[in-house]
Image (tube, rainbow, N blue to C red):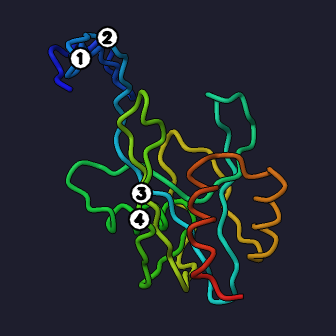
Amino acid sequence: MEIISRKNVYSGFLKFDVLKVKFENGNTIERDVIIKKDGVAIVAVTKNNEIYLTKQPRVAINEEESIEIPAGLIEEGETIEETTKRELLEETGCISNKLIDLGFFYGDVGSGTNKTHLMLALDVEKVQELKLDEDEFLESYKLPKDKVYEMLDNGVIKDSHSIIGLLKAKKYIEN
């Protein structure tokens, strides 16, 4: 596969490019590509096996309350670990010295470049109140692990990074 041309048609929080691609068999197609910064999603677990969740409005899906694990975009020059620590502190007021990399996934391999890195933060401790970005409106709270996995099983938690992160973290969290 060879990218013959790339044309940017929109640049904002997201970028949209149109690619012209040639395949080995000689066929040429055009594809729309959504470009977004990579991010992290954090399963934050206390020493008492409580998991921090956030509740926030999500305009794109017309939901007043989306229940999610803490997450955020990786800023230029930041490592995954730095972003994890920053977002954990911003969205929960917590810190952790026990981070485990759970891998990553692509949100939509058919049309997007965005990768979400999944991190497990163990023994998190609350050290401050939330420090939200200007455009963030969220609540942060912790629930017992069993309650969170019940919410996952009952479809209360609907976003992909939370579902995948919680499922991947399950084997690391004490019973």
Closer to the eye: label 2 or 4: 2
Above or below — where is 128 with respect to 55? Answer: below
Q: Nearer the viewer, residue 69 or 118?
A: 118
Dot 2 falls on a residue whose secondary structure is: strand
- Could you tell me how far apart the alpha carbons at marks 1 and 4 are, in whole angstroms? 35 Å
Above or below — where is 80 with respect to 73? Answer: below
- Could you tell me how far apart the alpha carbons at marks 4 and 3 are, in whole angstroms? 13 Å
- Identify the residue under disc 1: 21
- Could you tell me how far apart the alpha carbons at marks 2 and 4 are, in whole angstroms? 36 Å
Question: Who's the residue at 20% across and 54% down the image?
Answer: 77
Closer to the eye: label 2 or 3: 2
- Identify the residue under disc 4: 84
- Could you tell me how far apart the alpha carbons at marks 3 and 1 are, in whole angstroms? 26 Å
Split into 4 quadrants, where in the image is the N terminus? top left
- Mark sitting earlier along the chain (2/1): 1
Above or below — where is 38 with respect to 23? Answer: below
Position of residue 31 measured from the top left corner of the image (x, y, whole percent): 35, 16
Q: Nearer the viewer, residue 49 or 169?
A: 169
Say whether residue 73 is left or right of residue 51. Answer: left
All told, the count of numbered labels is: 4
- Identify the residue under disc 2: 30
Closer to the eye: label 3 or 1: 1
- Could you tell me how far apart the alpha carbons at marks 2 and 3 are, in whole angstroms? 27 Å
Say whether residue 72 is left or right of residue 38. Answer: right
